[in-house]
Every structure is written in C-alpha cells, then in structure tokens.
Image (cartoon, rainbow, N blue to C red):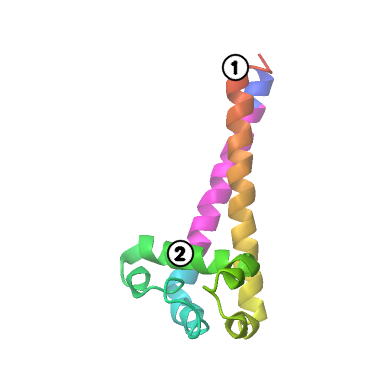
Amino acid sequence: MTTAGLIIGSLSCIVGIGLFVCIALALYLGYAKSEELTKHFKNSSSSITSATHRHSGPYGKMQLVGGISFVVTFPRFFLKHGILNAEDIGNFPLRLKRKLVALQWSFIGLFFAMISLVIVGKSGVFG
C-alpha cells in the first residue's frame, strides 16, 4: 500500500471515529435530555417533537435529537414555513442550543469529509 493510501485510510478512520462519537453524543442527549428538548416546543408544530420519536428506542431518540438540532441550527427555514414558533426558539436554553448546533455542524462536516475521502480514494489521483 502506498503512503497516500495509508493517509486516506487513516483519515477515513478518524472520520469514522468522529461519526461514532457524534452518534454516541446524540444518543446520550436523546436518553438524558429528551423531555427537556421537547418541552421547549409547545407552540410549534408537533412534527418537531413527535411522540413516536420519543418511544421508539435508540433510532427514535436519534431522530428526535437530529430533528431538534436541525430546527435549532436552521431556524429561519422553519419560521418561514410556519413549523416553528419564534417564541419557542427564543426561549430555548442557550447552553443546550450550542450543543445541538455543534452536533449538527459536526455531522455535516464529517459527512462531507467522508464524501471527499471516498472521491479522492476512488479517483486514483494518488496512484
């Protein structure tokens, strides 16, 4: 294996570990803070905090945290479409909002890093 292949493989492992850490953090927030997350969206659409997400195991907890972190990260879209109430997002705890925004951007960054590594690895640029 070439040096470039080892570098691409090592970076892929780092991305994989990062995704694992993000998933573990999302599961922790889903199990430890799900009630706190859902109580702040009383005036918004029920699709944000659907009860099916809360009671359907680990996958449901991941969907709940992912949906709420997406809403908190990109509130203008949801305000524009009438899904989110401005008062709800204004009253959301800043500390929890920062965690969810960091988690969302971490997932987005790791996803694009993974795509970039696959493209570079498959392209054969490094021979």
Left or right placement of residue 13 versus residue 95 in this view: left
Asked whether, in this view, residue 38 is left or right of residue 73, the answer is: left
- Amino acid type at circle 1 is Met
Pointer 1 residue? 1
Number of the front mark, 1 or 2: 2
From the top left corner, tell me how far across and down residue 11 is, in percent.
Answer: 63, 36
Q: Does the magenta portion include 25? A: yes
Three-letter code for the amino acid on which mark 2 is drawn: Leu
Look at 58% across and 22% down and name the residue there: 122
How far across and down, in percent of the image, does residue 38 sit?
47, 79
Towards the viewer: 10 or 46: 46
**Distance between mark 1 and mark 2 Cα atoms:** 37 Å
Q: Quadrant of the N terminus?
A: top right
Task: Kindly check if marks 1 and 2 are in contact, taking CB atoms under 8 A apart as contact.
Answer: no
Helix or strand or loop: what does disc 2 sit on?
helix
Q: Position of residue 71 (x, y in %)?
A: 56, 68
Q: Residue 75 falls in which quadrant of the image?
A: bottom right
As rendered, which of 62 and 40 lies closer to the eye? 40
Residue 15 x %, y %: 59, 43
* Position above or below: 49 against 20: below
Magenta span of residues: 7-28
Instruction: Count residues near mark 1 (Cα–Cα under 10 Å), then give few for <14, some for 14-19, many for 20+.
Output: few
Kindly indicate the quadrant of the structure image that contains residue 74: bottom right
Q: Nearer the viewer, residue 64 or 29?
A: 64
Task: Please give the name of the residue rendered at 52% of the width and 63% of the height, measured from the top-left corner.
Answer: 25
Describe the element under mark 1 as helix, strand or loop.
Answer: loop
Which corner quadrant of the image does residue 22 belong to?
A: bottom right
Visible in this render: residue 121?
Answer: yes
Q: Residue 27's mark?
A: 2
Which residue appears farthest toward the front when viewing the image? 81
Q: Residue at x 54, y 55 (%)?
A: 21
